[in-house]
Image (tube, rainbow, N blue to C red):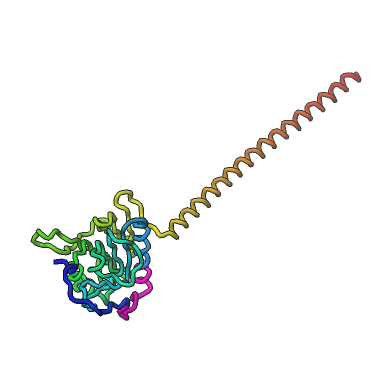
Amino acid sequence: MSLLTTKTASEGVTYPSSDGKPMAETDWHLHWMFRLIHLLRRRYAGTQTYVSGNLLLYYVEGNPKKRVAPDVFVVKGVEPHDRRVYKLWEEEAVPNVVIEVSSKSTTHEDLWEKPRVYDQMGVREYFLFDPLAEYLEPALAGFRRIASDEPDAGLVRMELDDQQTLVSEELGLLLRLEGRDLVLIDQQTGDRLKTAEECEAEERAARELAVDRALAADDRALAADDRATAAELALQRERELRRQLEAELAKLRGSE
């Protein structure tokens, strides 16, 4: 049963926005957490989809100890406004996808504790990415929720394909390992998700390349013009020299 339906009296209960734990274990973990949130927010911009991370998610009304803080999570069908915390009983929407930027020190929590909670909530897909490749081999793992009428209902481990790729049916994305990087690819178009800065850098590089090519074409045109001008001048000099020679010959014939 989904924890969304489990409620207790909550009058006067405080739900803190911080648990006192560090946001991320290392700079690498922090980088990937922010990057994944940025990429997914750009993907769902303008839609009724909430993308966040490192936000306390309370899943039992009246019990502030019942909480998790997913590194990255996506909830479809809710308003994407800023929140202090996320309360399931108020939002009435469970995260469709959770991604944890995992590490060796959080192995037990990420592989055993959180999956049980996410499974009870009804989270449909759960991914783990180990950016330092400290304990996951390969460094990407995924779980998908199986329909409740099947005997092995719950979050079931996915298998990576030969390209080190997992499919997120909820997001319509391919999650692929490339070296120590995690790449998100649109399943329909094959386009990689990019940050605004990466898109701007590519557009700037494309503009600079177009300018370089235009300048090179201009240089070639000028060089061709210069060659044509030089050829015309040489022809004119040849004609003038021939005229002078013919005049000299005419003079010599007249003096005979």
Compared with 66, 158 (above or below) is: above
Q: Is residue 52 magenta?
A: no
Task: Identify which residue is drawn at 25% across, 80% down.
Answer: 12
Compared with 237, 212 (above or below) is: below
- Is any atom of residue 115 visible in this view? yes
Q: In which quarter of the image is the C terminus?
A: top right
Q: Does the magenta stretch include residue 30?
A: yes
In the visual, does 7 lie left or right of 22?
left
Q: Quadrant of the N terminus?
A: bottom left
Image coords of residue 203 (percent x, y): 47, 53
**136 or 78: which is nearer to us?**
78
Locate residue 97: give its quadrant: bottom left
Task: Identify which residue is drawn at 54% across, 46% down.
Answer: 213
- Is any atom of residue 108 visible in this view? no
Image coords of residue 102 (percent x, y): 28, 71
Locate residue 153: give its quadrant: bottom left
**55 or 246: which is nearer to us?**
55
Image coords of residue 135 (percent x, y): 25, 72
Image coords of residue 138 (percent x, y): 25, 65
Q: Give the range drawn in magenta.
A: 18-33
Compared with 235, 78 (above or below) is: below
